[in-house]
Image (tube, rainbow, N blue to C red):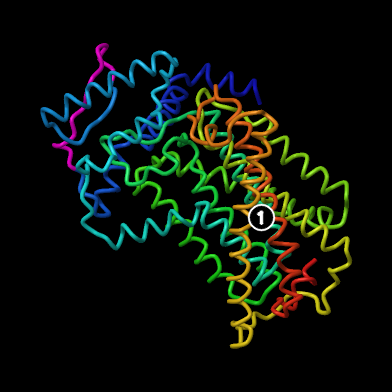
Amino acid sequence: MQEYRSIHRLFYPDKVNLEKKMWSEAIEYFKDPQQVAQIQEFFGVRIHHNQILQHKSGDGNSVMDFPYDNGNVTKTIRRKVNRINDERSSRNETNGYATSEDEAMPTSSSDPPQFTITNHIWYYLFLFGTELGDEIFYSTFIPFWFWNIDGAVGRRIVLVWAVVMTIGQCLKDIICWPRPACPPSVRLQNKWSQEYGMPSTHAMIAVSIPFSVVLFTMNRYVYSFTIGCTIAVLWCTLVCVSRIYLGMHTVLDILAGLALAMFLMIPLVPLVDATDYYFLTKDWALAILVAISIATVVYYPCSDKWTPTRGDTAMVVSVTAGVHVGAWLNYRTGAMSTPLLPPPYNIIWPSYPMLGRTVLRTILGFCCIIATKALFKFLSYATMCAILRVNSKELMKSRNCLENRNKVLVDLVYKYITCFMIGFNAVYLLPNVFSMIGIERPTFYTEL
């Protein structure tokens, strides 16, 4: 095969060069932030190009883009830009990636907007779409699924989500591609703007979660596979387009995230389905899973600057570990039993009493999740600060950077412990509480 390629290159050099050029041009085309701006304008974002003043540093390199040109204000901002440039130089931050101060300056309350929303339907729809791949969605979808739908499917979905999310987050800090340049596009959302952009983990999760639901339930429940796939496709499309619309990703980021997620799902879905039994019943398998979750945080590939991706990864893997430890403890204590009937099962629409118990489980459960987060965040943060002999309030207010090792360590530990307990309580403690007060889901302890 290698000899064939060598001969092909020898006799067809122009064709080989043409293929390379085509791929290079395609990458540059989909990476172009101008494509982002065009998509934003198509969905009703009017970008005020004539109001954007691009400031240049002394060496001619672009420093910052500002949405107006007013004499007094511009002088003030030039002084701020010079100060930030000096700080950048002292920290050797020359990778072209915006710092937290850079992100905050052009979006302060006194700055005129660089855009006008002309279609609010698209705006709110895409705000909702981006939340389908965000922390708020994870923290509500995962517990709700365990309490009210199916724990066996839930364990599998969580593990697929954790693997896909972790790989995507690691690649972001390895590739280190910045988010779309502004201008020509505009940033409609500043959340996660300190992260790098390639690949889009929102796109990866938009593939992994809805399609995992379909793949893990199609042989377990009786429903239309076509309808399930249609909903999954619409879900995925909404999330992906929302990330471009908000100016958070280029088209190339989205395409790479989609392709990578689909590639990972091919071996991952059957592997997770086969290993779920071992994680549930075998002590050694669960120990390996927990050890891998801790190792992922410890040996996470850090980039050349601080980003929140490592902390987000710590939360993802710790929730997964907590969920599986809780499920394992349910099994080890004898609470779980074999279901009376084998799948597939008919989907039963809830009666009024069932719906009432579902509402009670959800409200009580989320109140306990919020309390768990507050309690363990406080305890773990205070404990780590006491061990390191640092002031917790000062550390919490200190700047996020790689040099601030104490804060990096404390943040990772408290996020891991807190999210581990959230996953554990969602699967073990709260279902036991539901059983004690008579609002449990009858099939919860039969979902092996």
Residues 153 and 312: in front is 312
Q: Quadrant of residue 281?
A: bottom right
Q: Is residue 348 above or below residue 252?
A: below
> At 64% across and 20% down in the image, what residue appears?
3
From which residue to which does the magenta span run?
A: 48-61
Find the residue positioned furthest to the left: 71
Residue pictured at 41% horizontal, 28% vertical: 24
Query: Which image quarter is the N terminus in?
Result: top right
Q: Nearer the viewer, residue 12 or 325?
A: 325
Q: Quadrant of residue 223?
A: bottom right
Q: Nearer the viewer, residue 407 or 342?
A: 407
Determine whether the residue tagged by mark 1 lies in a helix, strand or loop: helix
Q: Amino acid at mark 1?
A: Ile
Quarter of the C terminus within the rendering? bottom right
Q: Is 31 above or below relative to 402? A: below
Q: Is residue 270 magenta?
A: no
Q: Identify the residue under disc 1.
A: 422
Say which quarter of the image contains residue 57: top left
Q: Position of residue 330 (x, y in %)?
A: 82, 63
